[in-house]
Image: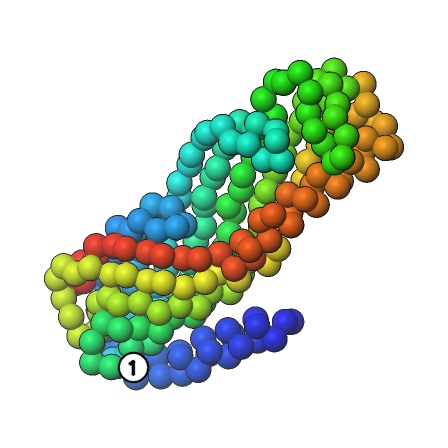
């Protein structure tokens, strides 16, 4: 287990150490949110005067055409994730420190737009040679999250309020695949080497997404 995961797990355990202190008084809330993870709903339950547990369900879809390495792709973006989070409220207000895990099914699928030639690796190829060029980007299924925010302390507050969070999902390096099918060179060894080189170029260009930023705004109601 990586040091980062160990630290996040340790933080979560430490934060939940006092969760059973006053369950009879714990409240609950629901929220509608918009974030860099998509549009979502959130359920929160109070665990003690300073602790809460949250579950977020996030989803978003977008289709558009974009260029990558001089090749135009029809892209389908799907953001789909579930967050399991523990909040610690160190003060008598809504400020919170958050740690937890994210079940991540975010993906980007694309297919190259028809063109006379494609530049792959360091070589130009015709459409007949390439055939159908398709790509996919996704991430590992479960990743740790840490962040801070401001929102209801459901143990102490009721009614409507706003919530905001900022944090990071440590997703690891994006997984990139690029494939050619139906082309006259689709099974050619040299062509496949250039496909792998192009795949690595894309992976290097988006490696910063190993730290996926989360910025979230929402409206909550506590009851």
Q: Nearer the viewer, residue 191 or 18?
A: 191
Q: Position of residue 2 (x, y in %)?
A: 63, 71
Mark 1: give few (<14), some (14-19) or many (20+) Cα within 10 Å: few
Relative to the observer, which residue lies in front, 156 or 122?
122
* Whether residue 218 is situated above or below residue 88 in the rendered picture: above
* Residue at 70%, 29% in the rendered image: 119
Tell me the residue at 46%/29% (across/down).
64
In the rendering, at what x and y percent does residue 99 appear? 43, 70
Q: Work out which residue is located at the far right of the displayed protein and give it.
A: 189
- The spot of residue 217 in percent (x, y) is 28, 55
- Is residue 162 rendered to the left or right of residue 203? left
Colour theme? rainbow
Quadrant hosting residue 167: bottom left
Q: Which residue is mark 1?
A: 90
Looking at the image, residue 88 sits to the left or right of residue 209; the answer is: left
Q: Is residue 29 left or right of residue 60?
A: left
Q: Which image quadrant: the C terminus?
A: bottom left
Q: Seen from this angle, which residue lies furthest left?
A: 159
Residue in the picture at 32% in, 62% down: 165
Would you identify the image quadrant in which residue 132 lies? top right
Residue 46, visible in the rendered structure: yes
Q: How many marks?
A: 1
Look at the image and tell me whether residue 102 can be seen.
no
Q: Residue at x 83, y 27 (%)?
A: 187
- Residue 4: give x, y in percent of width and height: 57, 72
Disc 1, SS = loop
Q: Is residue 62 above or below residue 37?
A: above
Quarter of the N terminus within the rendering: bottom right
Closer-to-camera residue (131/1): 131
């Amino acid at each position: 287990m990586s040091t980062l995961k160990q630290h996040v797990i340790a933080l979560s355990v430490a934060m939940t150490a006092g969760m059973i202190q006053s369950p009879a008084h714990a409240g609950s809330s629901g929220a509608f949110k918009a974030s860099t993870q998509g549009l979502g709903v959130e359920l929160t339950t109070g665990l003690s005067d300073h602790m809460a547990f949250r579950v977020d369900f996030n989803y978003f879809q977008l289709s558009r055409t974009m260029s990558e390495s001089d090749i135009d792709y029809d892209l389908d973006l799907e953001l789909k994730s579930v967050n399991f989070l523990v909040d610690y409220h160190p003060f008598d207000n809504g400020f919170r420190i958050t740690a937890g895990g994210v079940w991540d099914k975010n993906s980007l699928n694309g297919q190259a737009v028809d063109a006379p030639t494609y530049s792959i690796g360091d070589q130009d190829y015709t459409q007949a040679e390439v055939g159908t060029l398709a790509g996919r980007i996704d991430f590992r299924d479960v990743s740790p999250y840490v962040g801070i925010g401001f929102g209801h302390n459901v143990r102490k507050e009721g009614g409507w309020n706003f919530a905001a969070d900022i944090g990071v999902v440590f997703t690891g390096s994006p997984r990139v695949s690029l494939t050619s099918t139906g082309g006259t060179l689709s099974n050619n060894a040299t062509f496949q080497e250039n496909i792998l080189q192009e795949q690595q170029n894309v992976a290097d260009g988006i490696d910063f997404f190993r730290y996926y930023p989360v910025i979230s705004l929402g409206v909550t109601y506590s009851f």
